[in-house]
Image (tube, helix red, strand yellow):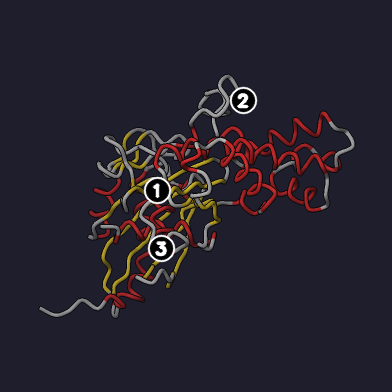
Amino acid sequence: MSLIDLSKQVALGVDIGGTNTKFGIVNHRGEVLDKGSLKTDAYDKVEDFIDALYEHVYPLMEKHGSEKHFDGIGVGAPNANYYKGTIELAPNLPWKGVIPFTELMTAKFNLPCTVTNDANAAALGEMLFGAARGMKDFIMITLGTGVGSGIISNGSLIYGHDGFAGELGHTIVKPGGRKHWSTGSEGSLEAYASATGITITAKKMRAEFPESMLNQYPEDEINSKTVYECAIKEDPIAIEVFRYTGQKLGEALANFVMFSSPQAILLFGGVIKAGDFILKPAKLHMERNLLPIFRNKVKLVFSELDEADAAILGASALVWEK
């Protein structure tokens, strides 16, 4: 039996978003050899989407297939069930109900396929290719339009009995607090610490402080990016928006630390571009709310994955996690 040449083994990583789907061919070193994208919302039927994905991907597979061996396909998608290989009741995808996604993908591509939610995929990518290399216990928090999470314990993702564990963004950080725009829950972490939550906070605070630089922008231009632009110009209200956001995040992180005692919490996503404006208050309030036995033990760090390729890397990591 010949030895396997890892340098010739590759995986196809696919990240399915509500608007766009990104895909790439990834090797064992976490190098994206080729990539592309297509519109998710252009296909009302999942079968048509998979056909279109195949048409986009096949030329890349042909290009690399003569010298590479494809181990499989990893997919990160909203509401993906790792155990069943399904995408279930995803509110931001055009395909409704329970979709037997891996079954359909394997039939089309003739390759084994694994799915999980996008934040779980990001955690696996970080463990194989990023800042969590060598760690067996950490939590990945993705701070983007929403707040996602992936929990690694003893080297394995926590999926729970049904495949949906780890929705830390929907834990309640302020009972009876801000109503979530989609779920209707009151006071969830996502309602405060996401880019959407930051926008809501900024609009509320600028209305209370007319002197803020934030009032120089039209209502529809207020977002986490414009808040950052004002913060670096030392606008105290913009800085307070991030401080308040960091406080809510830090209070939640303290609860997460006491749940799984991780070596580190990794932060990823567009919101972390705010840097220390959000990191310092998050660290302060995390430590302040921890029991003494947990204090000063948990690193709070930013992801090392390139944001443009992170979703593809994370999805491809599914192929090799076992």
Look at label 2 and name its amino acid. Arg
Residue at 38%, 51% in the rendered image: 137
Looking at the rendered structure, which numbered label has been put on residue 120?
Answer: 1
Mark 3 is surrounded, within 10 Å at the Cα level, by few (under 14), some (14 to 19) or many (20 or more) other residues, namely few
Between 20 and 141, the one nearer to me in the picture: 141
Mark 3 or 2, nearer chain start: 3
Look at label 3 and name its amino acid. Arg
Q: Are marks 1 and 2 in contact (CB under 8 Å)?
A: no
Left or right placement of residue 176 versus residue 90 in this view? right
Q: Which residue is mark 3?
A: 133
Residue 184 drawn at (x, y percent) = 53, 23
Q: Quadrant of the C terminus?
A: bottom left
Which element is circle 2 on? loop
Label 3 and label 2: CA atoms lie apart by 36 Å
Label 1 and label 3: CA atoms lie apart by 15 Å
Q: Quadrant of the N terminus?
A: bottom left
Mark 1 is surrounded, within 10 Å at the Cα level, by few (under 14), some (14 to 19) or many (20 or more) other residues, namely many
Q: Which residue is mark 2?
A: 178
Residue at 46%, 37% in the rendered image: 168
Between 66 and 216, the one nearer to me in the picture: 216
Mark 1 or 2, nearer chain start: 1
Q: Nearer the viewer, mark 3 or mark 2?
A: 3
Mark 1 or 3, nearer chain start: 1
> Where 125 sits versus 217, above or below?
below
Look at label 1 and name its amino acid. Asn
Label 1 and label 2: CA atoms lie apart by 26 Å
Residue 122 drawn at (x, y percent) = 44, 53
Looking at the rendered structure, which numbered label has been put on residue 66?
Answer: none
